[in-house]
Image: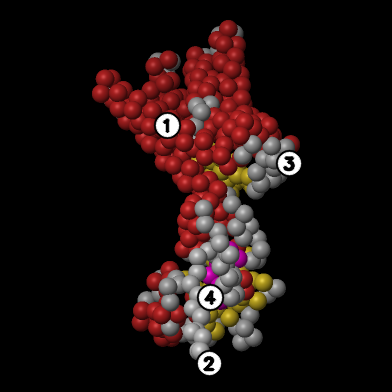
């Protein structure tokens, strides 16, 4: 679930939340329906009628977005993919999964369920609108349902554009996965296509703005920019995942990191580990040497300097459930998803309860750089020993002392 989102409850056991931006979009849609769409198709009604029907239309539209994401989630469950929850936000919604689909076919089915639902809802709303018109229902309701039919069908088709982060991009990724036998290669290919789609929409928006004027072209440019930025972020994410490969936490972590006892003052932290090392995080231990928490530079920055000498590390550290704890043999790719950027992006590495390392953003970047260079992961201290002798084929110099004649 997105941080800062409002929890709304559960549907079929799936947690549902929304961002505050949903209220903005709901209000904007209500305004558009009440002042533009409905008065044009059904003139002569009182203002309150337009606004009440417009609000109903906005709620039905948000319900359509929820149905789209529920379709993803229901099919995901049927394909043994764990669903974390659904979040509605300013640009629609998304279903978050804890695990990845096991096969390209499952990925295709999960992804295609969303656009199919939107297109189906478009047809359903259109059919109901036609039925109401046939029996002579008030035109304002016919217009509202017809608008919902068109907007749902359009969103369903638009989502099928072949580029991440759209559903069409996920379908393309599933197809590339099937063809190449490589899930990550499929995601990288779909992200590349998404950047092309985003650039194309931006170009189309510029042409629209120059030829037709108005704000429609600018809106198209904004959507294209959003898609391009999202696709670029996905490309970077999956490229990093490819670079990390089979690395474990132990291959990337900072071994034997700096640590202080919990009663050390923040001044001791600043004048000690933070000043004399390159680390931006320090582990905090208790009297028995057990890890109690972690303090980052960001934690120190939030404390006024005049309070450093009277504040202990225990008072500013992140501890308990807020502290990310990992094991050295865990896959690095899986652990990255658990790091929390809002808390500095650090994890404490414990081996049978003992502190053996810290894993932070710099360690992740170094591991990605090594992977992209095709280098082997750096060795752990216990793996470093006397260098092996050179191979027989390597040229060498040999000096023998002169033989003394007798």
Residue under numbered circle 1: 196
**Badge nearest the viewer, 2 or 3:** 2
From this viewpoint, is residue 108 visible?
yes
The tag earlier along the polypeptide, 4 or 3, is: 3
Residue under numbered circle 2: 406
Residue under numbered circle 3: 80
Alpha carbon of mark 2 to alpha carbon of mark 3: how far?
87 Å
Residue contact between numbered discs 3 and 1, judged by CB atoms under 8 Å: no
> In the figure, 149 relative to 93: above or below?
above
State the image coordinates of residue 175 (x, y, percent, origin top left). 60, 30
Residue under numbered circle 4: 257
Provide the secondary structure element on which disc 2 rests: loop
**Badge nearest the viewer, 1 or 2:** 2
Provide the secondary structure element on which disc 3 rests: loop
Span colored in magenta? 250-257
For the point 38% across and 36% down, the residue is: 225
The tag earlier along the polypeptide, 1 or 2, is: 1
State the image coordinates of residue 275 (x, y, percent, origin top left). 39, 79
Q: Nearer the viewer, residue 44 or 145?
A: 145
Q: Residues within 10 Å of mark 2 (few under 14, many from 20)?
A: few
For the point 58% across and 70% down, the residue is: 389
Q: Nearer the viewer, residue 221 or 5?
A: 221
State the image coordinates of residue 254 (x, y, percent, origin top left). 53, 70
Alpha carbon of mark 4 to alpha carbon of mark 3: how far?
39 Å
Q: Residues within 10 Å of mark 3 (few under 14, many from 20)?
A: few
């Amino acid at each position: 679930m997105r941080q800062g989102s409002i929890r709304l409850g559960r549907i079929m056991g799936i947690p549902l939340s929304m961002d505050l931006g949903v209220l903005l979009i709901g209000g904007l849609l209500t305004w558009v329906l009440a002042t533009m769409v409905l008065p044009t198709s059904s003139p002569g009604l009182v203002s309150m009628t337009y606004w009440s029907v417009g609000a109903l239309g906005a709620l039905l539209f948000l319900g359509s977005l929820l149905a789209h994401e529920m379709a993803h989630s229901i099919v995901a469950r049927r394909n043994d993919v764990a669903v974390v929850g659904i979040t509605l936000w300013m640009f629609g919604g998304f279903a978050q999964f804890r695990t990845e689909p096991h096969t390209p076919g499952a990925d295709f089915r999960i992804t295609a369920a969303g656009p199919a639902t939107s297109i189906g809802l478009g047809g359903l709303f259109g059919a109901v609108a036609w039925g109401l018109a046939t029996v002579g229902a008030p035109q304002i309701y016919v217009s509202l349902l017809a608008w919902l039919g068109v907007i749902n069908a359009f969103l369903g088709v638009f989502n099928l554009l072949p580029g991440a982060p759209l559903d069409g991009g996920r379908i393309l990724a599933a197809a590339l996965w099937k063809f190449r036998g490589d899930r990550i290669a499929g995601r990288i290919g779909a992200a590349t296509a998404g950047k092309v789609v985003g650039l194309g929409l931006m170009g189309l928006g510029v042409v629209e703005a120059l030829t037709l004027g108005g704000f429609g072209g600018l809106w198209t440019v904004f959507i294209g920019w959003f898609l391009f930025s999202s696709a670029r972020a996905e490309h970077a994410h999956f490229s990093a995942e490819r670079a990390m490969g089979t690395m474990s936490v132990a291959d990337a972590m900072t071994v034997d990191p700096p640590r202080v006892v919990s009663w050390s003052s923040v001044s001791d932290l600043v004048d000690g580990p933070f000043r004399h090392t390159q680390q931006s995080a320090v582990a905090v231990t208790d009297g028995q040497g057990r890890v109690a928490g972690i303090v980052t530079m960001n934690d120190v920055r939030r404390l006024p300097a005049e309070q450093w000498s009277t504040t202990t590390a225990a008072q500013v550290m992140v501890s308990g459930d807020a502290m990310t704890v990992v094991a050295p043999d865990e896959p690095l790719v899986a652990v990255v998803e658990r790091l929390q950027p809002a808390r500095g992006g650090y994890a404490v590495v414990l081996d049978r309860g003992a502190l053996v390392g810290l894993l932070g953003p710099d360690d992740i970047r170094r591991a990605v750089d090594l992977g992209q260079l095709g280098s082997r992961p750096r060795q752990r201290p216990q793996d470093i020993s006397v260098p092996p002798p050179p191979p027989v084929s390597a040229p060498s110099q040999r000096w023998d002392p002169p033989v003394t004649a007798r």
